[in-house]
Image: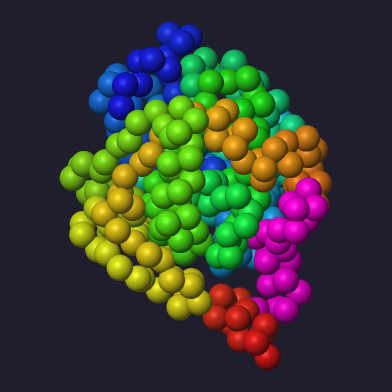
Amino acid sequence: MDWERFNLKGTRRVAVVGIGGGGDVLGTIPTRNSLRRDKFEVLIGSALWERFIVDPKPGPRSLDELDNIEEVLSETVCLAGGQTRIRGGAVPQACRLSAKLGEKVLLLDLTKGAKGLAGGIREMADKLGIGFIVGIDVGGDVLATGKEEGLKSPLCDSLVLAALVNSGVKSIVGVVGLGCDGELKPQELESRLSEIASMGGLLGALGMTQDDVKLMEFLSEGLNTEASKLAVMAAKGVRGNVPIREGTRVAQVSIFSSITFFLDARILYEASELAKVVANSETVDEANEAMHSLGIETELDFERAVERLGVTSYRDYVLRMKG
C-alpha cells in the first residue's frame, strides 16, 4: 500500500480507528503495522460502543461516562489508556489493547450523532496534527445497501463513515475480515466491493504478515471480538462456515477474510444510502430513527430489546424471541 500519496499535509501522523464497535480495534493492527513500516506515527482506536455482553447499557457511551481519560481532545474524541474505564467497570476493548501495547488510544463518542462526531474528529486532527484517518470495519457491513437479509449492525459503521467524510479530514475505509461477522454473504460483499471499484474507489489491499498474526493473537487474549479473531484465523488457513454469537449466527470464512481492502471514504459514502441518511444526525437516536425511515432495524434496537427482555446472552435472546 502506497501510504505516501495520502500524506498531503506532510505530518506523518495517522489515526487508524475501528468504526464498527469496540472489537474492531483488533482489525486496525495490520494497517497500523504497515504504516509504521513506512515510518508513519500511528494512533489506533475505536468507536466507544461495546457489545452488550461487555457493556449491558444499550447504545454507545459518551466521554462523560468514562473514568481515567488521558486527554479530552474534543467534545467527541479522547485519548484513553490501559486504566480508562466505562463508569460501572466495563473496559473498552481499545483500552485492553492500550494496556498490552503500552500506547494511548483514541475513543470516539457517537452519542452526539454524525454531526457531533464529525466536528470532534476535525478538532482532534487539528490538535494532534493528524494527516489522514483510516477507518477499519471488520466484517464488511459498512458496505451494506440495507437490503441484505443478514444485516444486523448497520448503525455504528454508517454513523462513523458519515462523520469521517464530513469532518473534512482525508479519510480512507479499510474492510477486513470479510464475512467474519456473519452478516453480509460473500457474494454480497464481493458485489459491493466490485461496485465501489468500478467507481474508482478501490485504493489497494493489504494481507497480514506473520508478524501481524503473532501480534494479533497476543492482543486477542482476553479480548471480546469474534469477527476480528476469525480474520486472524483466516490468515492461518481456517475456512468454511464457523458458528459465532453462541451458535446463533454463522460466519463464512475464507483466506480473503485476512485481507484489508482500502476504499476511498467519500466514494463509499456517496454509494451508501445508510451513511447519507444519518449524516445530519445530532444524536444517536436521530441516527437510529433515520435508519428506521429506510425500514432498517439496528444494533441499538437489538440492545434495547435485550435489556427489555432481561437476557444476558445471544442464545437466550433467540430462545425468548422464538418463545
Query: Where 305 sits versus 184, above or below?
Result: below
Left or right, 263 with respect to 306, comes to: left
Q: Residue at x 65, y 60 (%)?
A: 299
Q: Which percent across, then down, holds residue 122?
A: 64, 22
In depth, the one of 277 and 129 nearer the eye is 277
In this view, the residue in front, 74 or 135, is 135
- Looking at the rendering, the stretch of residues picked out in magenta corresponds to 290-311
Task: Say which residue appears at 45% left-offset and 49% top-offset.
Answer: 191
Please report the residue visible at 53 percent of the width from the left and 46 percent of the height from the top. 143
Membership of 294 in magenta stretch: yes
Name the quarter where the N terminus is drawn: top left
The x, y position of residue 118, in whole percent, is: 68, 29
Residue 155 shown in magenta: no
Question: Image quadrant of residue 117?
Answer: top right
Left or right of residue 307: residue 185: left
Q: Quadrant of residue 237?
A: bottom left
Residue 168 x %, y %:
63, 20
Q: Which quadrant holds the C terminus?
A: bottom right
